Image (cartoon, rainbow, N blue to C red):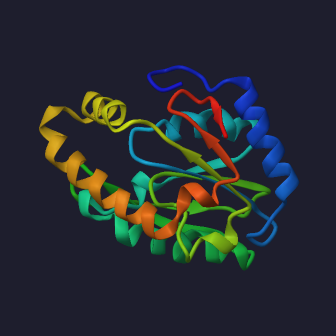
Amino acid sequence: MPDGGAAPAETVAAIVAATAAAGPRCGRTTVLAIDGPAGSGKTSLAAAVAPALNARTIHMDDLYEGWSGLAAAGDRLTEEILAPIWLGRPGRYRRYDWHDEEFAESHEVPVADHLVVEGVGCVRASSRRFLSVIVWVEADDDVRLARGLARDGVAAEPHWRDWMATERDLFARVGTRELADVRVDAWGRLRP
């Protein structure tokens, strides 16, 4: 699935079926959250599932304020996007530009039937009540680190290692894997 591959049709079908069965919990919008550690394949999975739901995708990478932004991004997701949509109003956020290290342009998120949110830490205590389906994507640390360094360059390794420790703590506090309705491995295959 990562590196240009596609998620297996069986996985996409299972996630779409779970989403249809769950129905909306964010006003009239059914929100599918795809969470898991960095480099596990969440973005690729979202790219495969969103078209099947005719859904827009929100990438948590746009909400983190750089390498130290994991903690605050959950509140940004809830306050700027999910809570307004729940109230029947469009959400709005400013994308963080990792290269310029500052907030860039604003984006509106219209109220729609479906919304996919993907990224580390999109499932939080503050966001859970708005989420219809939670998908957990997992991969071994060595696979994730290799994927991350291939994308970001070897100079990013200290950042990646710090991020991996921070996300591990977050997942332990939230219990994200245990909350998941669907579990998927690093290649998009369904897991028990």
Residue 53 visible somewhere in the drawing: no
Relative to residue 64, is residue 187 depicted above or below?
above
* Closest to the observer, 106 or 34: 34
x, y percent for residue 169: 35, 64
Relative to residue 149, is residue 67 depicted above or below?
below
Residue found at the far right of this picture: 21
| Relative side of 6 to 103, left or right | right
Residue 132 visible somewhere in the drawing: yes
* Closest to the observer, 189 or 157: 189
Q: Quadrant of the C terminus?
A: top right
x, y percent for residue 122: 52, 61
x, y percent for residue 73: 41, 67
Q: Residue at x 49, y 36 (%)?
A: 41
| Relative side of 104 to 110, left or right | left
Image quadrant where residue 109 sits: bottom right
x, y percent for residue 63: 41, 61
Residue found at the far front of this picture: 192
Q: Residue at x 62, y 27 (%)?
A: 7
| Relative side of 79 to 161, left or right | right
